Image (cartoon, helix red, strand yellow):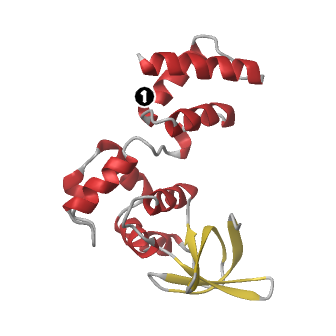
């Protein structure tokens, strides 16, 4: 619904900020990492956003980077993790560090995050290990679509990325949908063996 909101920062704390835009002042829940990235009050700010709408509440969440938002949305898919818990996790470390912890499967470190015990850390790692990738590693839009489709089929993101990159280096070209389908099919064969 909302991708990004740009406005003037009116007030901030470690968990909320207020952005004025178009005659409306938005209250946005944020992580302490995002709070630390915000400029001085009355400066212009752009935040990636997620609107959570439930029966009894509607809350807007803001993120300094698209990676932070992607991790937030992925954490919400884990059984037992809600928006507040996801924000607590994101408040502990920079998104790149959390991504590394998730992809390396570091249970010890993740279980030390506030409100995350060993069982919750195991659920998070099981659900997300290898499923997230940093934006700078994601490649072109078309190769990213292939990678995302293969990950949705259950393949590990790291392995998928290596295979797709290898196929592209070997002369694969993504100029048309036929070549995209060919690389997709070749990747399935390689990953399935």
Residue 140 percent location from the top left of the image: 65, 34
Camera-side residue of 57 and 106: 57
139 relative position to 179: left or right: left
Camera-side residue of 105 and 22: 105
Badge 1 element? helix
Q: Is residue 58 above or below residue 81?
A: below
5 relative position to 89: left or right: right
Measuring 43% from the left and 60% from the top, which residue is drawn there? 75
Which residue is label 1 attached to? 159
Camera-side residue of 94 and 108: 108
Residue 24 percent location from the top left of the image: 75, 87
141 relative position to 28: left or right: right
Residue 14 percent location from the top left of the image: 44, 81
Measuring 51% from the left and 35% from the top, which residue is drawn there? 153
Measuring 68% from the left and 32% from the top, which residue is drawn there? 142
Q: Residues within 10 Å of mark 1 (few under 14, many from 20)?
A: some
Specify the quadrant that holds the C terminus: top left
Q: Is residue 21 above or below residue 100?
A: below
């Amino acid at each position: 619904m909302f991708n990004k909101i740009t406005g003037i920062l009116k007030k901030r704390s470690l968990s909320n900020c207020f952005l004025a835009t178009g005659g409306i002042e938005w209250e946005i829940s944020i992580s302490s990492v995002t709070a630390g990235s915000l400029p001085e009050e009355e400066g212009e700010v752009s935040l990636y956003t997620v609107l959570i709408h439930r029966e009894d509440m509607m809350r807007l969440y803001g993120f300094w980077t698209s990676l932070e938002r992607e991790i937030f949305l992925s954490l919400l898919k884990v059984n037992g993790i809600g928006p507040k818990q996801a924000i607590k996790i994101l408040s502990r470390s920079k998104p790149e560090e959390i991504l590394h912890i998730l992809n390396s499967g570091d249970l010890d470190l993740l279980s030390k995050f506030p409100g995350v015990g060993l069982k919750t850390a195991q659920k998070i790692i099981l659900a997300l290990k290898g499923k997230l990738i940093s934006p700078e590693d994601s490649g072109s839009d078309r190769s990213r679509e292939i990678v995302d489709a293969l990950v949705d089929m259950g393949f590990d993101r790291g392995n998928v990325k290596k295979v797709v990159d290898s196929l592209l280096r070997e002369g694969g070209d993504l100029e048309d949908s036929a070549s995209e389908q060919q690389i997709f099919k070749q990747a399935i064969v390689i990953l399935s063996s």
